[in-house]
Amino acid sequence: MAFEKTPRGTYGQKTPAFAVPLMKMLNPLMLWQVHRGGRSAGMRMVALTTTGAKSGQRRQVILGALPDGEGAWLIAASGGGTAVNPAWYHNLAAHPGQAELVIGHDTYDVDATQLAGPQRDAAWDRIIVAGPRYAGYVTKTDRVIPVLRLTTKG
């Protein structure tokens, strides 16, 4: 289920140097929020575990997700409007069938599909209605923010 990766932009929001170590430190607290059904930016907090594109190591990130029918979720690789796609996006592109999604206390094996054209546009519109903060990200970068559908297996 490979997908065509969206190219990086030529400009975008800068990630502060302290952000990555801070997020690693806060990850246990954010995972606790995922287990409690927490919400962020108007969307349900989920934990996505991917397989590293180069390292092969398992990596976990906390994201906002929007339900998309039975057993499917939408996520946006916004990176807060940075010029580059998030690392987890590259991991999913390399291994779209090797991901896990934690929602509350439940863990699901998922397949990732990148949406394109009218499907992507309709999903993006739903995302910005649920989480208006996402609408501002497109003004910070010239890259097209990828929208992915995670579908549970089985």
Image: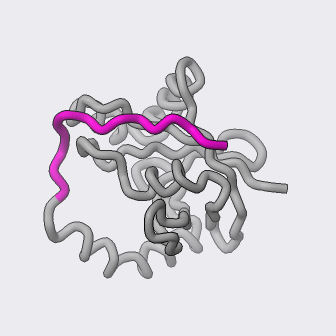
Spot occupied by residue 31 in the image (x, y as percentages of width and height) = 49, 75
* Quadrant of the image containing the C terminus: bottom right
Spot occupied by residue 134 in the image (x, y as percentages of width and height) = 36, 39
* Quadrant of the image containing the N terminus: top right
In this view, the residue in front, 28 or 86, is: 86
Q: Residue furthest front?
A: 54
**Residue 33 appears in view:** no
In this view, the residue in front, 114 or 124, is: 114
Residue at x 30% of width, y 38% of height: 8
Q: Main secondary structure of the magenta part?
A: loop
Quadrant of res 142: top left
Q: Which residues are magenta?
A: 1-15
**Residue 123 shown in magenta:** no
In this view, the residue in front, 8 or 141, is: 8
In this view, the residue in front, 79 or 126, is: 79
Residue at x 70% of width, y 46% of height: 72
Against 42, residue 130 (above or below) is: above
Residue at x 44% of width, y 57% of height: 88
Q: Residue furthest top?
A: 118
Residue at x 51% of width, y 60% of height: 45
Report the side of 28 relative to 138 (left or right). right
Quadrant of res 34: bottom right
Spot occupied by residue 108 in the image (x, y as percentages of width and height) = 71, 64
